[in-house]
Amino acid sequence: MARTRTRIVAALVLIVILPAAAATAGVEVLTANQRVLAIAAIGGQNGIVQTRTLAMVHAAIHDALNTLDERYRRYAYTGPLLPGGSPEAAVAAALHGVLVGVTPDFGNAGQQAAALAAANSDYDASLALIPDGTAKADGIAAGRAAAAAILALRTGDGATLAAIPYVPPIGPGFWQPTPNPVPANPPGVISFLPANLPGWGNVTPFALNDGTQFRPDGPPALDSPDYAVAYNEVKSVGAQFSTTRTDEQSEIARFWYEGSQVGWNRITRTVAASRGLDLWEQARLVALVNIAMADGFIAGWNIRFYYHFWRPVTAIRAGDTDGNTETAADPGWNTYLNTPPIPDYPSTHSALGAAAAEVLARFFGDDEIAFVTTSGAPFGGITRQFSSFSQAAQENADSRVYAGIHFRTACSDGLKLGGKIGKFAVGHVLPPLR
């Protein structure tokens, strides 16, 4: 695979809100996507919560545009059409309406205030570029109605109740809080954190029937040959100072380490821009990708906290307790990159990548679309080139083994899960009407 090696920025990087001066004539869907990621991060939303916000914003944008000209089935808002309304005003109002609605539910007071100020400033700057008149007023009305509809639909969906108490089962094979390598990689991350949002698997999905819909059979038994193979692979290639991990595999681990919701939205924007999609096509594509990824986290969390499977760093340090003669313990073993504080199976990073890749391939009717993309924080500035969406999804999954933070079985089953979710989303929401 062709690749370009660039300088890696290994620092904590703040996502910066686009200032009012950077606003362009009208709010494009792809620009709105960047803004929602930035504002959600300022509001204290972690990557899991961000997928819900992204799906809500882009469902509202999709509905607002299709209220002006109904080309695709709307998701939540089914009110009267407003033909002739300004699409730019509709997008701006839908984006603003959802952000203002969800921001008070997450983060602390300071983060909420900063996010609301940024959303309001961004909205005012966007509307200032649109001439006053009936078209602008109708566009705003469509965007506000679409935002109100998705906010009403998601009220009581369980997202604000996801931080429930969690006590995992005790014994070999079960998750427990995990250490990070010393020094932490990336730096500044605390070890032995409690499980992150253990109730997220109970959140109402956007396209799926419920979080259990595609639940797989589970990780391999500890005493099985399959488990031994997965154990010994990650023990070798994912170790902090591995002698079997290649330079490219280390780069792949760092490249894909950022949140899936950031990396795969960047890929979506890159490909959408290169294909010359109009606003309605952009809106449908970005909404489908984010609906699928949001459901990927919901289904993945449901599965993770059903099987409670231990992470490689726990398993390898306690390999003498698993009853498998082919898994030698190494009490001092460390991962290459930090382990997120959640059970191993399945890899939701793999699932979200596969879900997004499936949506992209089905939307364009072709998996083999080449693209180049560059990573963001915490290992920003790495550029890689891909010949297909499925190739990128596979590498995304492989990266978690190279990082030492997932067993191969968690990644392979995560890929299968994500593919099913992406296919289901495209088949069940936002279909063309003509």
Image (cartoon, rainbow, N blue to C red):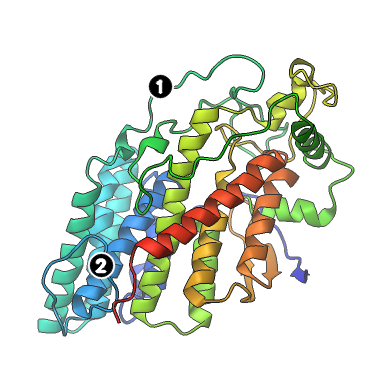
- How many marks do you count on the picture? 2
Query: Element type at marker 1?
Result: loop
**Mark 2 or mark 1, which has the lower sequence index?**
2
Q: Is residue 262 visible?
A: yes
Residue 340 pos. (x, y %): 58, 36
Q: Determine the image quadrant of residue 130.
A: bottom left
12 lies above or below 269: above
Identity, as a three-letter code, of the amino acid under mark 2: Arg
Left or right of 275? Residue 291 is left
Is the residue under label 1 in contact with that under label 2 (CB below 8 Å)?
A: no
**Location of the N terminus (image quadrant):** bottom right
252 lies above or below 165: below
Dot 1 alpha-carbon crowd within 10 angstroms: few under 14, some 14 to 19, many 20 or more: few
Q: Is residue 259 visible?
A: no
Give the labeled residue for mark 1. 165
* Separation of marks 2 and 1 at Cα, in angstroms: 37 Å
Q: Which mark is residue 74?
A: 2
The residue mark sitting in front, 2 or 1, is: 2
Query: Element type at marker 2?
Result: loop
Q: Residue at x 59, y 51 (%)?
A: 416
Residue 228 pos. (x, y %): 79, 31
Q: Which mark is residue 151?
A: none
Q: Residue at x 64, y 41 (%)?
A: 410
Q: Determine the image quadrant of residue 146.
A: bottom left
**Location of the C terminus (image quadrant):** bottom left
In the picture as drawn, the residue positioned furthest to the right comes out as: 243
Left or right of 23? Residue 263 is right
Residue 53 pos. (x, y %): 35, 52
Identity, as a three-letter code, of the amino acid under mark 1: Pro
Residue 117 pos. (x, y %): 27, 55
Q: Residue at x 35, y 79 (%)?
A: 279
Dot 2 alpha-carbon crowd within 10 angstroms: few under 14, some 14 to 19, many 20 or more: many
